[in-house]
């Protein structure tokens, strides 16, 4: 599936976004979720930050796939997930 790239305004933690699109005349709803991951401790190393991200992605609901890691700041980083689309195999 090709990607549709849209600028989504800055969102707070645990925000859900639904976008309705038409593909070849068929309406589809694309669902996105933004999660804010907070760093633990004071001034974590780059390796510690990578481990936090790996665990957050690995342990996330399997119906959602990570699509974007946002720019980190001193205490947090945004992750964007997209709801997996089930393919209709009807003939």
Image (cartoon, rainbow, N blue to C red):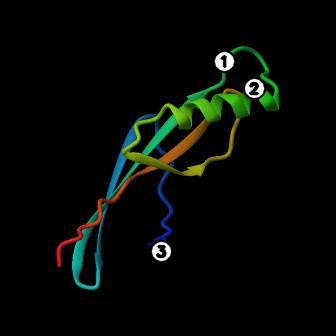
Q: CA distance from mark 2 to mark 3?
A: 33 Å
- How crowded is the residue under tag 1: few (<14 C-alpha within 10 Å), some, or many (20+)? few
Write down the residue under mark 2.
48
**Side of 90 where 2 appears, left or right:** right
Which x, y percent locates residue 50? 72, 34
Write down the residue under mark 1.
40
The vertical placement of 66 against 57, above or below, is below
Instruction: Name which of mark 1 and mark 3 comes first in the sequence.
Output: 3
Mark 1 and mark 2 residues within 8 Å of each other at the beta carbon: yes
Q: Residue furthest top?
A: 41
Write down the residue under mark 3.
2
Q: Residue 88 appears in which quarter of the rendering?
A: bottom left
In this orientation, does residue 76 appear? no
In this orientation, does residue 90 appear? yes
Label 1 or label 2, whichever lies nearer to me, is 2
**Side of 78 where 47 appears, left or right:** right
């Amino acid at each position: 599936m090709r990607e549709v790239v849209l600028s989504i305004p800055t969102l707070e933690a645990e925000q859900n976004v639904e976008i309705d699109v038409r593909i070849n005349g068929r309406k589809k709803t694309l669902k996105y979720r933004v999660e804010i991951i907070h760093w633990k401790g004071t001034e974590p190393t780059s390796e510690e930050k990578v481990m936090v991200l790996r665990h957050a992605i690995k342990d996330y609901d399997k119906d959602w796939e990570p699509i974007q890691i946002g720019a980190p700041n001193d205490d947090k980083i945004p992750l964007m997930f997209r709801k997996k689309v089930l393919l209709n195999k009807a003939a």
